[in-house]
Image (spheres, rainbow, N blue to C red):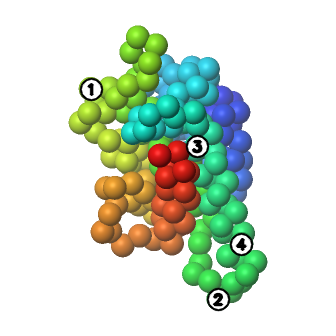
Amino acid sequence: MSNLVVKLLPEVEQIKDETLKNKVIACWEEAIEFRGWTEELLRNIPFTLLAENVTITFIDHVRAVCKMCIACDEVLNDIHAERKTPINRDYLIAGALLADVGKLMEFEIIDGKPQKSDYGKHIRHPFSGVGLAFKHDVPSEIMHIIATHSKEGAGEKRLPESIVFHHADFIDFELVK
């Protein structure tokens, strides 16, 4: 199944730390297995159920936000160089790829349509995502990105990687709304 994760999310290959890369893949594998998601379903479910007529898919959203995070880090490095706040690129990429992995537990297909599952009505994806990450021994800095990326992170002091991710995520989300 790791081949499927890499096929869906080729950005995972940009994580230089092999151990971290394998942990990210393991989180995705477990989330996919939780409901038996197929490649076709993963490529076709909307990235959010909070807006009507969403045409951006879940996988495209995850990839777009990850790529925006990488681009932001590159621009900041290019312009600000050593004056910028340090950002751990591996943590940024891992956090971007894992922030919404809990949606695979939050969503389910009922009568051919994606809906919030009973599980998802009680446990939103930032919580289940952190749970998966904890189970797979992902560093706490990455769990912080997962935990603080959505409304659950409002009012929390965010790490630099979480700030970049939060804004990239909401660029994609707000443009859809």
- Residue 79's disc is none
The residue most toward the left is 122
Q: Mark 4 or mark 2, which is nearer the start of the sequence?
A: 4
Q: Mark 2 or mark 3, which is nearer the start of the sequence?
A: 3
Q: Gap in Å between the C-alphas at discs 2 and 4?
A: 13 Å
Q: Position of residue 119 (x, y in %)?
A: 28, 30
Q: Amino acid at mark 3?
A: His
Q: Nearer the viewer, mark 2 or mark 4?
A: 4
Q: Position of residue 91 (x, y in %)?
A: 56, 61
Q: Mark 4 or mark 3, which is nearer the start of the sequence?
A: 3
Q: Position of residue 149 (x, y in %)?
A: 42, 57
Circle 2 SS class: helix
Q: Which image quarter is the N terminus in?
A: top right
Q: Mark 4 or mark 1, which is nearer the start of the sequence?
A: 4
The residue most toward the right is 78
Circle 3 SS class: helix
Q: Gap in Å between the C-alphas at discs 3 and 2?
A: 31 Å
Q: Position of residue 46 (x, y in %)?
A: 51, 32
Q: Amino acid at mark 4?
A: Val
Q: Gap in Å between the C-alphas at discs 1 and 3?
A: 24 Å
User: Which residue shows up at 71% across the image and 53% down it?
Assistant: 14
- Residue 61's disc is 3
Q: Which residue is mark 2?
A: 83
Q: Which residue is mark 4?
A: 75
Q: Amino acid at mark 2?
A: Arg
* The image quarter in which residue 56 lies: top right
How crowded is the residue under tag 2: few (<14 C-alpha within 10 Å), some, or many (20+)?
few
Q: Which residue is mark 1?
A: 118
User: Which residue shows up at 38% across the image and 59% down it?
Assistant: 148
User: Which residue shows up at 39% across the image and 54% down it?
Assistant: 150
